[in-house]
Image: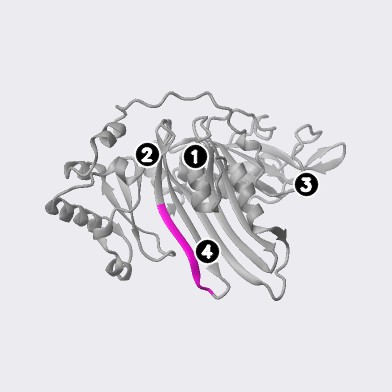
Amino acid sequence: MKVMRNRLLAVIVLMACSCFAAMAQGRNSIVKYVTENNLYRSGNDVTVTNIDVEWPASLDGNGMPALQKVLCKELLGVSATTMENGWREFHASLGMRINHMPDSVVRHYVYVKLERLWQENGRYASFYLKRQEVGQDGVQKAELKKFITYDIANDKVLNLDDVFNEYVDENTRVAFEALLDQGAYCDAEDRQMIDLTTLPADFAVMGNVALINLGGPYDHDDFATVSLNNLYQLGLLKHGFVKWLEGKTKSKPKKKESVLAPANFDASLAGDSIVYNINAAPLFPGGQDSLIAFIKSNITYPAVDMALKHQGRVTLSFVVEADGSLSDVTVVEPLSPGLDREAVRVVRLMPKLRPGERNGVNVRTRMTLPIYFRLSNNS
């Protein structure tokens, strides 16, 4: 996705006393941004992980067991209904974490990517899932590329039967394939190999558009965008789905559930615990003014969010390690997938901070940082 440097943008970073403070609990939506490049050994097998996920730990105060089950199964290959349990089981299945690649072992490679595409608060969220397993000889063992949309109110991942009418006449089918062809985003070589008659296989809802997966090679993100209104006019959408889109369906009554406090779940695999009762808080080199200048000089406004006039606050939580480096970056107040991702990117660019101290000793501390995105009136 292309981004543009914002010349008409005033990015406001609040540096009040609460800017660097122990994180408040009870946020409604929490998204974990986890990257991992590690080695794990089990017997004579070593697994190399390459992971980059934007994992929702909760949305609108909901632990989302149905979504977590799908994400854990499809991306991690484990059966779990929380990110914390899934993450723990996944690493346990790989063996012991090691720091160096031994000689004379069998190597395996696991690539995992999860990207947030769209979210309508209280209604649904859409994602793009990718997983690939490759053997030592470079032969691909397993592959997944999949769009999904999760119904937040009803704790359900939508499937094809929820959305598309199964039986359509030949003319309608031809018209649908024409829409796919017109909205396709893929190179000419891939297009020659894509069989439109097998579609849709999976999809994601993004506002008034459906994103249809076209398949293609794993490294190529081939898809088509189709107007939901055009699909409706062709009679391809089920009546129940149309009512759901219009917000006219009744949601299941929300259960009172005890949801994991996801922001406290440390995905960094660090052994030391996080200390909240500290004598001195972490500090950006040069102080708050330097932090403001750093963020302003590095922020880029995503083109899509600029076009959609998305603006407001993204609040991040992260761990400041005892050596001043940052880990476990989490969005605890999401705004939009694009702006959240940009805020995370900039935080990850930050140099080492002066770490928090307790009784004169550097300790791991969880901190929060709100970043405000503002567009000028003529942008």
Query: Which residue is denoted by mark 3 in the rendering?
Result: 322
What is the CA distance from the residue labelled 1 to the residue labelled 3? 33 Å
Q: Toward the viewer: 147 or 349?
A: 147
Q: Which residue is mark 2?
A: 378
Q: Magenta segment: does it hold 153? A: no
Residue 119: image x %, image y %?
42, 39
Q: Kindly identify which numbered label has been placed on residue 10.
A: 1
State yes or no: discs 3 and 2 in contact (Cβ < 8 Å).
no
Asked if 336 appears above or below 114 in the picture, the reply is: above
In the image: residue 119, left or right of residue 20: left
Image quadrant assignment for residue 366: top right
In space, the residues marked 1 and 2 are separated at their CA atoms by 12 Å
| Mark toward the viewer: 3 or 4 | 4
Among the two numbered marks 3 and 2 on one chain, the one whose residue lies closer to the N terminus = 3
Q: Which residue is mark 4?
A: 133
Q: Earlier in the sequence, mark 4 or mark 2?
A: 4
Measure the alpha-carbon separation of dots 3 and 2: 44 Å
Q: Which span of residues is magenta-colored?
A: 138-146
Given this view, does label 1 or label 4 mark the residue nearer the observer?
A: 4
Which numbered disc, 4 or 2, marks the residue closer to the eye?
4
What amino acid is found at the position of numbered circle 3 in the picture? Ala
- N-term-proximal mark, 1 vs 2: 1
